[in-house]
Amino acid sequence: MKTVIPQGTRKGVGHYVLGVISNGMLYISGQLPIDPETGVMPESGVSAQARMTLSTWRHRIGCR
């Protein structure tokens, strides 16, 4: 098992890690839909929040 802390991110704010790789599978912790550059959550609904969350994780794991 390997702990994942992507470059350019802060350590989790609690007793958890951002991700763990175990047996070739990546497990990630919960992610709020907050824009990492502005610190603001989209207010235009759940779809925009879901896109922000997935975009943030794609960036963190290196999928541009």
Image (spheres, grey):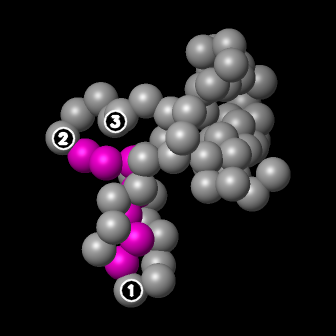
- Helix, strand or loop status at disc 2: loop
Label 1 and label 2: CA atoms lie apart by 22 Å
| Pointer 1 residue | 23
**Dot 3 surroundings within 10 Å: few (below 14), some, or many (20 or more)?**
few
Q: Is residue 18 visible?
A: yes
Residue 11 location (% of width, % of height): 36, 34
**Dot 2 surroundings within 10 Å: few (below 14), some, or many (20 or more)?**
few
| Pointer 3 residue | 12
Who's the residue at 47% across and 70% down the image?
A: 26
Whether 38 is drawn above or below 50: the answer is above
Q: Quadrant of residue 34?
A: top right
Label 3 and label 2: CA atoms lie apart by 7 Å
- Helix, strand or loop status at disc 1: loop
Residue 21 location (% of width, % of height): 40, 71
Which amino acid, mark 3?
Gly
Which amino acid, mark 1?
Asn
Between label 1 and label 2, give the one nearer the viewer.
1
Which amino acid, mark 2?
His
Q: Is residue 46 visible?
A: no
Instruction: Evaluate if marks 1 and 3 touch, with contact meaning CB atoms under 8 Å apart.
Output: no
| Pointer 2 residue | 15
Quadrant housing the N terminus: bottom left
- Helix, strand or loop status at disc 3: loop
Span of residues in magenta: 16-22
